[in-house]
Amino acid sequence: MGYQTWNWWQKHCHGSVLITRPHNREPVLRGRVEVEGIQKNAKAHFWLITAAKDQYWLQCEINLRSDAVWKAEFDTGQSPVPRTCTLLLVRVSDFAHSLFEDIKSRSFKANYHGAIKMSPPSSDFEVVQTLVMCANQTRQNLPQILGHLARLRSGRVRKQLP
C-alpha cells in the first residue's frame, strides 16, 4: 500500500512521462535515433541521458508539448561494432536542470563529446524509465542483427556477429 501511495504522489506532483518508441531491446541504427513518448500533466524537467556504469552522456531535455506527445533524438555514437546502448529518461530538479544546461553549453563551445562521471543524489536525479537497445552498424546488416536476436531468444546461437 505504501509503494502504491508513493507512486500516486509522484505522478500527482510531477506528472508522468514515458517513452513509447523505440521499444526496449529494439535494434537501432548507429548515430542519431528518434525517440517518441507521451506525457500527462508533467510539471518537472525531464532529460534523455545515455549511460554506461558511472559515465553519463547528456542528450537533450524533453520538450513537453500541450498535445501530450513529445519527440527527441539521442546519439548512439559511431562505434563500428554492434553493441548495447542504455537510454535513461530522468526527472531532474531545477538545480540539476540548470547544471545540465550549463554542461551542455560548455561542452558545445569546447567541442567536447565525452562522458561526465557522477553519482547523482536521488533528490536531484530520478530515473523514470530505462531502455536497452542494440546499436548496429548500418541498414545493410539489420536483417542479420534481427536474425541473431531471434536465435538468442530461441537459444540457438551458432556464430558471433561480424
Image: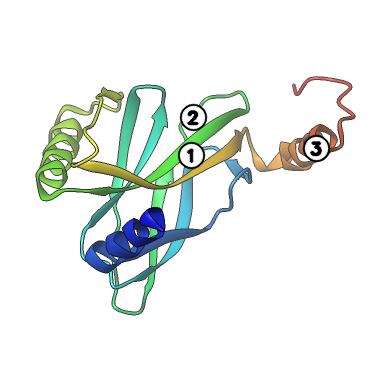
Circle 3 SS class: helix
Q: Residue at x 75, y 24 (%)?
A: 161
In the rendered structure, which amino acid carries the disc numbered 1? Gly
- Mark 3 or 1, nearer chain start: 1
Q: Of discs 3 and 2, which sits in the foreground?
A: 3
Circle 1 SS class: loop
- Mark 1 or 2, nearer chain start: 1
Find disc 3 in the rendering and name its residue: 153
Residue 117 in the image: state x and y as whole percent.
26, 22
User: In the figure, is residue 156 to the left or right of 86?
Assistant: right
In the rendered structure, which amino acid carries the disc numbered 2? Gln
User: In the figure, is residue 57 to the left or right of 32?
Assistant: left
- Nearer to the camera, 110 or 70: 70
Q: Are marks 1 and 2 in contact (CB under 8 Å)?
A: yes
- Nearer to the camera, 19 or 127: 127
Find disc 2 in the rendering and name its residue: 78
Label 2: how many Cα within 10 Å (few below 14, some 14–19, many 20+) = few
Circle 2 SS class: loop
Disc sitting over residue 31 in the figure:
1
Q: Residue at x 34, y 23 (%)?
A: 55
Residue 39 in the image: state x and y as whole percent.
37, 68
Cα separation between marks 3 and 2: 27 Å
Where 99 sits versus 129, above or below?
A: above
Q: Residue at x 86, y 31 (%)?
A: 155
Q: Of discs 3 and 1, which sits in the foreground?
A: 3
